Image (cartoon, helix red, strand yellow):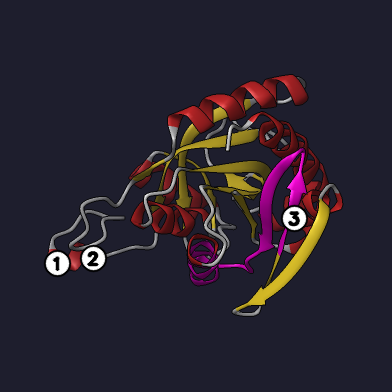
Amino acid sequence: MIGIIGAMEEEVAGLKAHMKDVRTEERAGMVFYTGTLCGKECTVVCSGIGKVNAAACAQILADRFGVSMIMNTGIAGGLHEEVNVGDIVLSTDAVQHDMDCVGFGYAPGVIPRMKESFFRAAPELVDLAEQCCREENPEIGVFRGRVASGDCFVSSAQKKAEIREKFDAWCCEMEGAAIAQTAYLNGLPWIIIRAISDKADGTAAEQYDRFQDEAIGHFLKLTLAMVGKLGF
């Protein structure tokens, strides 16, 4: 079983439209859609925005639906200059940029008393995602890099620079690292696929509104192709 999480309804609507033999179940205020997608058994769900919603959603996928892997698809703000609006960033790993226990001697992003804080995506999933993206979206760039997550919408150049410099992250958003941590705790392979909707700077809000649909279209094509090739 493949679990696919999007934070917003717009991010999962296209996936749900392609599903067959769908049955639904509501848990913790989230509606889980289980059926076949590109011939594979999948559960697709809108988690809601933010790390707590995302982590709760991922744990339900593990406990109730017994998923074998988790994909987190959606949109994000780009942090590196070479990443343009509409491009795709695939997670090599993920970190919570707002995890701050510096006062206790921990580096930014480090979770006290955990073995890992920079959670690593499954390399084979990243390889497949890149292959599918180049096939399905040849007109855009696809990059591998760290995803930084936090409970804030990054809309200033100052905050963008801070996250990029502290964490060498390629994009920022509000859910992925929480899903990654939950998958790590459950021993599940995972990947974050993020289409860039804005540059996470002073123009972020304007860019987001203009390019959201374009970005969603790019990761939808990639995700459908990838699901069809997965061996789960």
CA–CA distance in space, label 3 to label 2: 34 Å
Residue linked to disc 2: 101
Q: What is the secondary structure assignment of the residue under circle 2?
A: loop
| Residue beneath the point at 86% across and 52% down | 17
> Quick one: label 1, few (<14), some, or many (20+) residues within 10 Å?
few
The answer to whether 223 is drawn above or below residue 184 in the figure is above
The answer to whether 210 is drawn above or below residue 89 in the figure is below
Looking at numbered disc 2 in the image, what kind of residue is underneath it? Cys
The answer to whether 231 is drawn above or below residue 1 in the figure is above
> Quick one: label 3, few (<14), some, or many (20+) residues within 10 Å?
many
Look at the numbered discs 3 and 1 and tell me whether their residues touch, using CB distance below 8 Å. no
Q: Which residues are magenta?
A: 33-60
| Residue beneath the point at 60% across and 30% down | 129
Foreground label between 3 and 1? 3
Residue linked to disc 3: 12
Q: What is the secondary structure assignment of the residue under circle 1?
A: helix
Foreground label between 3 and 2? 3
Q: Earlier in the sequence, mark 3 or mark 2?
A: 3
CA–CA distance in space, label 3 to label 1: 40 Å
Residue linked to disc 1: 104
Q: What is the secondary structure assignment of the residue under circle 3?
A: helix
